[in-house]
């Protein structure tokens, strides 16, 4: 192989490397090709293709190159790498309903008058104006726990059964770090309980059955505690003596044929022996 006509003899090292390109192909590196380019030394096309491989066919000649992170000199003896910008997440925006038009006015169930908006209508979809609202008795709010215990309702009865009951969320007045309270309208809870149990009598029967089962469970727990207490008292009264017993024999008795016997005064053990 002959060197390219554009090469001069002023660069013998480069000429030797390119002249032996066919025999020493790995000697051509990206750094050497860049040096030759800076020195305006022409390099053959095969050498350039070897040092700078083309992008794959899937990228269509465009290579994905990741930009190097920016380096920040803090001046305190160390260097920081600038982190990429985090994606800003847009929170869910809750829009208030638009103004009520005249033809959308609701009719109050108490006074039969038209009204545009009210506390019960906006929070519970219950058509009652603010003038007729009785927050202490008829339109009282109860917690979710009270609704489940008093009317034997489950979470699916409140949240999944159509239509789902609306509620408001308030901070727990007993402890600020506890979870928020869910408050439901008592009238809607009573109506939902009748839908689930069928009648007030069926609801009362179910409450009686649960009360009896609760009393049985309490009695079982009480009996179990009494049994454990008795067992503990018995075990405390009986203590096993870990000291070995030493016999205390009484006077010896003379038997026939020079045989003698002693009896322990504590445990009654008999010791028979012969005297020579």
Image (cartoon, grey):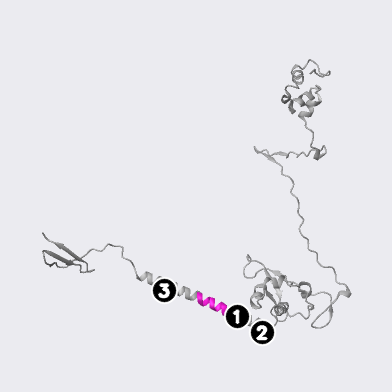
Q: Which of pointers 3 and 1 lies earlier in the amino acid sequence?
A: 1
Nearest the camera: 27 or 169? Answer: 27
Residue range highlighted in magenta: 209-220
Task: Give residue 205's quadrant in the image.
Answer: bottom right
Using the numbered discs, state the Cα–Cα distance from disc 3 to disc 2 in whole angstroms.
44 Å
Mark 3–mark 2 CB contact (< 8 Å): no
Q: Specify the label residue 193 is tagged with.
A: none
Report crowding for label 1: few under 14, some 14 to 19, many 20 or more residues within 10 A (C-alpha).
Answer: few
**Neighbours of disc 2 within 10 Å: few (<14), some (14-19), many (20+):** few
Q: Is residue 198 left or right of residue 231?
A: right
Q: Residue at x 51, y 77 (%)?
A: 219
**Which residue bears the numbered disc 3?**
230
Pointer 3 and pointer 1: residues touching (CB < 8 Å)?
Answer: no
- 125 sits to left or right of 266: right
- Asked which secondary structure carries label 2, the reply is helix
Mark before the other along the chain sequence, 3 or 2: 2
Disc on res. 209: 1
Q: Residue at x 63, y 76 (%)?
A: 149
Find residue 192 and report its horizontal and vertical position in percent.
72, 77
**Toward the viewer: 259 or 131?**
259
Residue 130 covered by magenta stretch: no
Q: Position of residue 244 (x, y in %)?
A: 27, 62
Q: Considering the image in quadrants, where does the N terminus appear?
A: top right
Point 72% across, 26% down: residue: 26
How far across and how far down the image is residue 8, in percent?
A: 81, 16
The residue at which mark 2 appears reads as 201
Q: Separation of disc 3 and disc 1 at Cα?
A: 32 Å
Q: Is residue 86 above or below residue 160?
A: above
Check disc 3 and report its element: helix, strand or loop. helix
Reply above or below: 243 against 218: above
Q: Residues within 10 Å of mark 3 (few under 14, many from 20)?
A: few
Question: Given this view, does label 3 or label 1 mark the residue nearer the observer?
Answer: 1
């Amino acid at each position: 192989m002959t060197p390219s006509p554009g090469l001069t003899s002023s660069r013998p090292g480069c000429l030797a490397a390119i002249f032996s390109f066919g025999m020493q192909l790995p000697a051509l590196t990206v750094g050497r090709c860049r040096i030759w380019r800076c020195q305006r030394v022409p390099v053959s096309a095969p050498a350039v293709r070897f040092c700078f491989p083309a992008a794959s066919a899937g990228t269509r000649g465009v290579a994905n190159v990741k930009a190097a992170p920016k380096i920040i000199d803090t001046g305190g003896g160390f260097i920081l790498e600038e982190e990429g910008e985090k994606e800003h997440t847009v929170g869910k925006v809750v829009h208030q309903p638009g103004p009520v038009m005249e033809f959308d006015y609701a009719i109050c169930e108490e006074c039969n008058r038209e009204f545009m908006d009210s506390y019960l209508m906006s929070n519970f979809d219950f058509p009652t104006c603010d003038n007729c609202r009785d927050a202490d008795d008829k339109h009282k709010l109860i917690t979710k726990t009270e609704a489940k215990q008093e009317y034997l309702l489950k979470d699916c009865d409140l949240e999944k059964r159509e239509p789902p009951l609306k509620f408001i969320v308030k901070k727990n007045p007993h402890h600020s770090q506890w979870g928020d309270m869910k408050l439901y309208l008592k009238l809607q809870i009573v109506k939902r309980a009748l839908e689930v149990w069928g009648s007030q009598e069926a609801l009362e029967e179910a409450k009686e059955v649960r009360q009896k089962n609760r009393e049985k469970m309490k009695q079982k727990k009480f009996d179990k505690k009494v049994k454990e207490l008795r067992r503990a008292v018995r075990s405390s009264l009986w203590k096993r003596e870990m000291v070995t017993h030493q016999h205390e024999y009484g006077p010896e008795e003379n038997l026939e044929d020079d045989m003698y016997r002693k009896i322990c005064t504590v445990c009654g053990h008999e010791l028979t022996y012969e005297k020579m």
